[in-house]
Amino acid sequence: MTAVAESLQLQLTPPVRYLLRWADTCLIHAQRLSEWCGHGPVLEEDIALSNMALDLIGQARGLLTRAAELEGQGFDEDQMAFLREEPDYFNLTLVEQPMRRSSAHSPGGDFADTVVRNLLLATWLKLAWQRLSSSADAELAAIAAKALKEARYHQQHAADWAVRLGDGTAESQRRMQAALDKAWPYVGELFAADEVDAAAAAAGLGPSRAELREPWRAEVQAVLDEATLALPAEVPFVATGSQGRHSEHMGFILAEMQSLQRRYPGGTW
Amino acid sequence: MNTSTTATTTRSEWPLWEIFVRPKAGLDHKHCGSLHAPDAKMAVQMAREVYTRRQEGSSVWVVRSSDIVASDPGDKDMLFDPAEDKVYRHPTFYELPEAVNHM
């Protein structure tokens, strides 16, 4: 009598993978951000973080729907979001790292960790949306045009906090720099282009991630300068979440996200 | 023991800001509430989150609550009562054209 939803068997062509990378990065980042709901440092910031999580879920929904259309078996956004196995998620490893909440595997993070991650990602996503808004895929271009406005705000909000905390007290600066150093090893992946990127760029679907490196560095550097924070040195490590090879934290997020849809297939509010 | 060097400037709470939102171009900014924020720029961002996230606004003003000068409630009679029986002060003797929506 126990129904359990089966996992999707997807045809992961390069364009589908390309879309899922953006979609899953938004989806998992949103899941992490939503950990702040009810726990924000002040009511106003609690609402701000929750709103950003909702914006990102909205972006993920559009992208997952479009990815499913390109995939061609008629799956919907919920199936795409909740019924894949871990290796079929292609988000950046950075977004699956513990954010606020502690667990058996992590002490959790502070508000500085969240501000830093938001700044690094919102800047990256904004640059991506700018380029995706002229995609040869009209649907993707429309999603990007809408998301761009949201990402600009996310970036501004994160940058404002980064400056206030970085150029704040000795304690807030120490925490911000520590958060930056902690996130930094995962940054290499943001620009690690491969054959999926090359195919997307050649087809006019969207930019290669490599394209984003220089403008990203310039924008992040400008914020960090104002925040009196130091850009950490480059590290050779390149994370592999966008290849479907995830860190130990991914399975726990998916278990939490999927349990309901797995146990009650097709369940709705 | 010297405790004077441990003086902390940390404030326990951010200042209060009054928020005014303009629903759309052509209308006035209306007071819609207040919130705490560390400075003016963050107050604008917070106001956007708290008061305009369902597209209620096209413009936001924020004012430090402490900068608002209010009338004394004790002066209410003196300041406001006399207007009531002076009908000539009220623009009720002519009809507005239909096109004037937001008087």
Image (cartoon, helix red, strand yellow):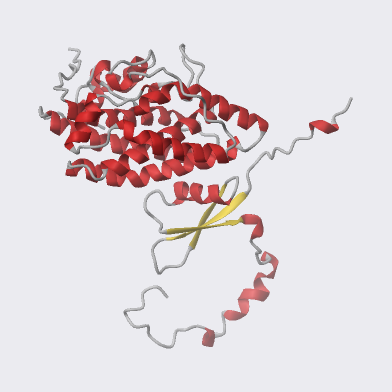
Residue drawn at x 40%, y 73% as measured from the top left: B102
Q: From the top left corner, tell me how far across and down residue A261 is, in percent.
A: 25, 22
Residue A112 is at least partly visible in this image: yes
Give the quarter of the figure containing the C terminus of chain A.
top left
User: Foreground: A149 or B70?
Assistant: A149
A166 displayed left or right of A240: right
A244 displayed left or right of A138: right
A172 displayed left or right of A106: right
**Most extreme residue toward the left, as rendered?**
A73
When asked about the image quadrant of residue B1, the answer is top right
A9 displayed left or right of A166: left
Give the quarter of the figure containing the N terminus of chain A.
top left
Q: Is A264 placed above or below A217 here?
A: above
Q: From the top left corner, tell me how far across and down residue A197 is, in percent.
A: 25, 29
Q: From the top left corner, tell me how far across and down residue A125 is, in percent.
A: 35, 37
When asked about the image quadrant of residue A167, the answer is top right
Residue drawn at x 62%, y 32% as measured from the top left: A172
**Most extreme residue toward the right, as rendered?**
B1
Tell me how many marks there are.
0
Residue A43 is at least partly visible in this image: no
User: Foreground: A255 or A232?
Assistant: A232
Residue drawn at x 22%, y 21% as measured from the top left: A83
Residue drawn at x 50%, y 33% as measured from the top left: A115
Q: From the top left corner, tell me how far across and down residue B83 is, in percent.
A: 58, 80
User: Foreground: B23 or A129?
Assistant: A129
When asked about the image quadrant of residue B84, the answer is bottom right
